[in-house]
Amino acid sequence: MERIPILQMGEFLMVTIQVDMHDKLAMSLQDDLTERISRKNAKGVLIDISSLEMVDSFIGRMLSNIAAMSSVLDARTVVVGMQPAVAITLVELGLSLKGVRTALNIERGMALLQSIRSSQQQVEDSPIEQPYA
Amino acid sequence: MNSPTPEIVPIRSESDVVIVRQNVRKWSISVGFSLVDQTKIVTAASELARNTLIHGGGGELKSFLLQEGNRKGLCLIFDDQGPGIPDIEKALQDGYTTKGGMGLGLGGSKRLSNEFEIKTEVGKGTSIKIIRWKA
Amino acid sequence: MNSKLPTIVKEFETQILQEWTKNQLSQMGSTDKISESELKSESQQFLNLFQISLQSGNTSVRQSKEWAPIRDYLSNLSRTRASQGFSPTETATFIFSLKKPLVARLRTEFEKSPAVLLEEVTASNELVDALGLYTTEAYQKGREELIGRQQEEMLELSTPVVKLWDGILALPMIGTLDSSRTQIVMESLLQKIVETESEIAIIDITGVPTVDTLVAQHLLKTVAAARLMGADCIISGIRPQIAQTIVHLAIDLGSIITKSSLADAFAVALDKRGLQVSSQRQKTALRGEVSAQPPLNH
């Protein structure tokens, strides 16, 4: 069965969706990603959908689910590159992808993941007794 | 004036939903829809094709290219012989779902079309017609 | 019965032309929209074509190919008249004033047989009426084309998406927003966001007199769509009346950043991008103060 490849870049995972996804493929991506996050202890997931020509409620739900599941596994999700026509249609459809962070392109998405990560690390690293040290 | 013979796409499996999307994209390009309008009707078709498959137990899509004077449009009809919809009002509400979806299928595809018509009979099946006109 | 009109028009073309132009000039009064010689030559051309089409014996002015040259001529004429500032009445008068000379000519010809005269006059009037109506319609069509063109030009003129800074776009909207215009504008804004990779877009509605529910919804949808793409929108320049409307209509602007002026919105945008604006003068003044003091010892 065909699968969408997942790339690893340091602490982050990256997925580029390029095919017209049928529902089973979307479900398997969801499974593969959560499995990889937990196995590699990944801290962030970047999903590039710039080549997707449409996102319907099923794919929208998959994106929301991935964000929610990875959040439980302590990884942040950023969806990047949504096309204007796709965004307009999703809004009309009534989907707002709550809980999903977005960025204009891969570069900005990576920067966003990194900035979330470093603010997390600051909190982790700073001793509680001396917050201003 | 309708095109003489409709094009028919069977909806029997999940990969047929993908084929529906590809065909609707092709037709909407031939009508001359803008990219946004193409995306809207393809998305609506995807929702309805999935409904036909999941709730109707499969069926088919008929498409007509419309021409009324200077106005051009695309008409899509999704037919199934499934259990039908007992309460249409409720089914059209956002968030109403029977099969664990997001419940945006019917209401959402109605918002994405210019005309929306639903005929259903419990035990007999459902037929949903949508039309989008070229802006 | 075979109408004698074709033969009569052919035979008396010069006389009819003379009377017709005289009629037109007297009906129009003094005008600087068209010169007498222009009018004469236009009337001459028309009558010539009219005469040729008449000979065919076909009276279906609107459809038949025999009358096609006349239809083309009238379409062009009404279009130019519309652009020259002629009113619809003035334009239609060109044709309708042909009735009198034709009827006068028929009367002299058929003085002795009133029944034939009546028939000929009716036929001739019907023909002129059909041509007159065609002219009016063509005039109307010309106006509609003109309005359509102007609307398109207006749309292009009134909806520029401008880059204020690296990563910051602004869309200053001017004039009444209708639903279709808002939609087009919003689509071009989203497209520009992708092209310029701008993370912040300011929609300034200072120049918008009113906002109705539908337009407000379009604005909200655009903000939502931009957010899905990874960009933030700020709405600025909301007039007091519009603020009242928004509250009265119970439109929820929710978490959208709104600012009263474009300047305020720009400041927010710069801040979000981690940029700062500072005054050069103040800086030098401060530096001056520092240098005037004795250097600090550490």
Image (cartoon, grey):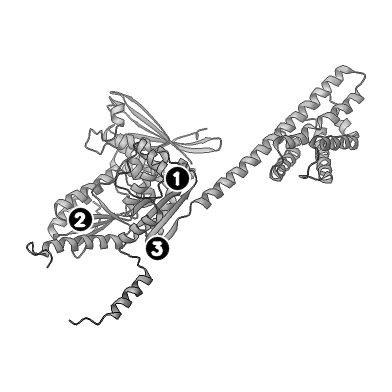
From the top left corner, tell me how far across and down residue A51 is, in percent.
35, 55
* Number of on-image labels: 3
Residue placed under numbered mark 2 in the picture: A76
Question: Which disc is residue B110 wearing?
Answer: none
Please tell me how crowded label 3 is: few (under 14), some (14-19), or many (20+) other residues with Cα within 10 Å.
Answer: some
Residue C102, quarter of the rendered image? top right
Q: Quadrant of the C terminus of chain A?
A: bottom left
From the top left corner, tell me how far across and down residue A2 is, in percent.
25, 52
Mark 3: which secondary structure?
strand
| Dot 3: chain letter | C
Cα–Cα span, label 1 and label 2? 35 Å
Cα–Cα span, label 2 and label 3? 30 Å
- The amino acid marked with disc number 1 is Thr
Residue placed under numbered mark 3 in the picture: C165
Q: In the rendered view, would you say C189 is above or below B126?
A: below
| Dot 1: chain letter | C
Residue placed under numbered mark 1 in the picture: C182
The structure residue drawn at horizontal position 84% and vertical position 41%, both measured from the top left corner, is C44
Residue C25 visible? The answer is yes
| Dot 2: chain letter | A
- The amino acid marked with disc number 3 is Trp
The structure residue drawn at horizontal position 88% and vertical position 30%, both measured from the top left corner, is C8
Relative depth, front residue between C134 and C218:
C218
Cα–Cα span, label 3 and label 1? 24 Å
From the top left corner, tell me how far across and down residue C265 is, in percent.
36, 55
